[in-house]
């Protein structure tokens, strides 16, 4: 069996690591980790009704492997935020124990989830060291939710949101992908729901990352359209972006409530991108739309030392493209869909 090294010191190095920088000078501080490619929903804009060919168990990183890469990321590459996603990250076995080990690294920990099962787990996850949570919710109408996700689970998601709030996983963000002819008539309702619950609403433009390859630009509800609709209900006071965050934010005038829009397609924020992504099977991606990956799992399983893995990581980021080029005639979709990359 290949040697498995888990002997990275748990303590942070005495000196600050050199920044993880690409050739355009973008410093990377944020790591998205996919904990599994599996999911218990089948959102129509994400994957087909029958699901996908999930990764076999032996191909996904185990907790020790994942933790070792996360330590290298934080201690040797200076990454400061770890965002856990999937697939559906709550499906990962032993999640609280993994979270507790990740929390020891000292980075900010967040989770992006569809919210199924969050109601009974939010307090435990908070206790394990999770700081905040993003919950995906595209509609408040039960029948529409069942059609859109192909599962009748709206009640679970609403309970999950309430539990996350009660557990103090602040801020609780609600992510919705508006799609024309599906849920675009609920933009105001979703914001009002978020305001009433004390959540922070964010709208995400749909991207050509569905597994079916059916993405259609004309079905995407653009950021401009979202803002026009919200602007007819509230006066929107621009806040801008927090650092390199993908969301542009607006405050609803006369309130403390903030709405975010992630306009990946129509207002790309690639110039300030600080993200790098690790798939559940240990492939490092320098962009959601990258067509190449760096195989960190192979390095881990062949006994590479930390310096070798750090070098591979820096090389991967150095080769990052300046932008994603959706809309260009020669745009090529990545082989993996969003759910297998980690959105
Ligand atoms: N299953 C979890 C969830 O739904 O929150 C985490 C993974 S999911 C891939 C992460 C986010 O990506 C969700 O907010 C989802 O709505 C969004 N998403 C999925 N497919 C998308 C697409 N084609 N375009 C834009 N966002 C997408
Ligand atoms: Fe699952 Fe999230 Fe994709 Fe919906 S968007 S099918 S919840 S991975």
Image: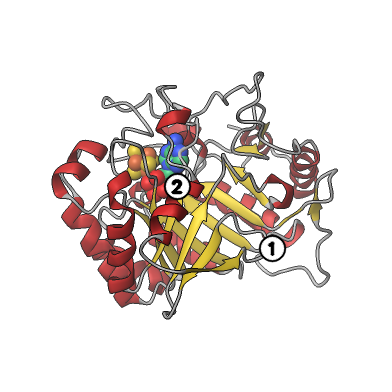
- Is 184 on the left or on the right of 319, as rendered? left
Residue 86 visible, this orientation: no
Residue plotted at (31% across, 49% down):
138
Residue behind label 1 places its C-beta within 8 angstroms of ligand 1: no
State yes or no: discs 1 and 2 in contact (Cβ < 8 Å): no
Mark 2 surroundings: few (<14), some (14-19) or many (≥20) residues within 10 A: few
Q: Is residue 169 above or below residue 338?
A: below
Crowding at dot 1, Cα within 10 Å, few <14 / some 14-19 / many 20+, comes out as few
Residue visible at 62% across and 66% down in the picture? 242
Residue topped by disc 1: 9
Q: Nearer the viewer, residue 151 or 304?
A: 151
The residue nearer to you, when weighing 233 against 159, is: 233
Q: Which residue was labeled with disc 2?
A: 225
Residue located 23% across and 61% down the image: 158
Q: Secondary structure at mark 2?
A: helix
As drawn, the residue found furthest toward the front would be: 232
Q: Is residue 155 left or right of residue 74?
A: left
Picture disc at residue 141: none
Task: Residue 243: tell me if it is visible.
Answer: yes
Residue drawn where x is 31% and y is 32% of the image: 44
Question: Quadrant location of ligand 1?
Answer: top left
Give x and y (percent) for residue 252. Answer: 44, 71
Point out the image quarter for the N terminus. Answer: top right
Left or right: residue 192 compared with residue 288: left
Where does the image place residue 208, in percent across and percent down from the top left?
A: 50, 30
**Residue 312 at x, y = what percent?**
76, 39
Looking at the rendered structure, the secondary structure element under dot 1 is: loop
């Amino acid at each position: 069996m290949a040697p498995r090294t888990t002997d990275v010191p748990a303590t942070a190095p005495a000196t600050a690591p050199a920044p993880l920088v690409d050739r355009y000078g973008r410093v990377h501080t944020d790591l998205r980790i996919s904990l599994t490619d599996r999911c218990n929903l089948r959102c129509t804009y994400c994957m087909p009704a029958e699901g996908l060919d999930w990764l076999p168990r032996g191909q996904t990183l185990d907790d020790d492997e994942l933790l070792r890469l996360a330590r290298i990321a934080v201690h040797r590459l200076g990454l400061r935020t770890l965002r856990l996603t999937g697939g559906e990250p709550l499906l990962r076995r032993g999640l609280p124990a993994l979270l507790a080990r990740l929390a020891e690294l000292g980075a900010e920990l967040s989770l992006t989830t569809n919210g199924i099962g969050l109601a009974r787990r939010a307090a435990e996850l908070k206790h394990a060291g999770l700081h905040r949570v993003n919950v995906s919710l595209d509609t408040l109408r039960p029948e529409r939710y069942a059609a859109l996700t192909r599962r009748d689970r709206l009640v679970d998601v609403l309970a999950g949101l309430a539990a996350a709030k009660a557990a103090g996983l602040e801020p609780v963000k609600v992510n919705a992908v508006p799609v024309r002819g599906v849920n675009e008539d609920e933009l105001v309702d979703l914001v009002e729901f978020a305001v009433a619950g004390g959540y922070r609403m964010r709208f995400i433009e749909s991207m050509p990352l569905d597994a079916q390859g059916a993405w259609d630009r004309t079905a995407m509800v653009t950021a401009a359209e979202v803002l026009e609709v919200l602007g007819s209900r509230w006066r929107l006071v621009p806040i801008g972006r927090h650092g390199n965050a993908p969301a542009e934010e607006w405050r609803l005038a006369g309130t403390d409530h903030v709405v975010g829009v992630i306009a990946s397609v129509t207002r790309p924020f690639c110039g300030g991108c600080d993200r790098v992504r690790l798939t559940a099977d240990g492939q490092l991606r320098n962009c959601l739309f990258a067509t190449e990956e760096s195989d960190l799992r192979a390095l881990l399983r062949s006994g590479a030392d930390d310096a070798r893995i750090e070098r591979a990581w820096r090389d991967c980021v150095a080769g990052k493209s300046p932008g994603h080029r959706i809309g260009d005639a020669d745009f090529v979709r990545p082989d993996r869909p969003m759910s297998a990359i980690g959105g």
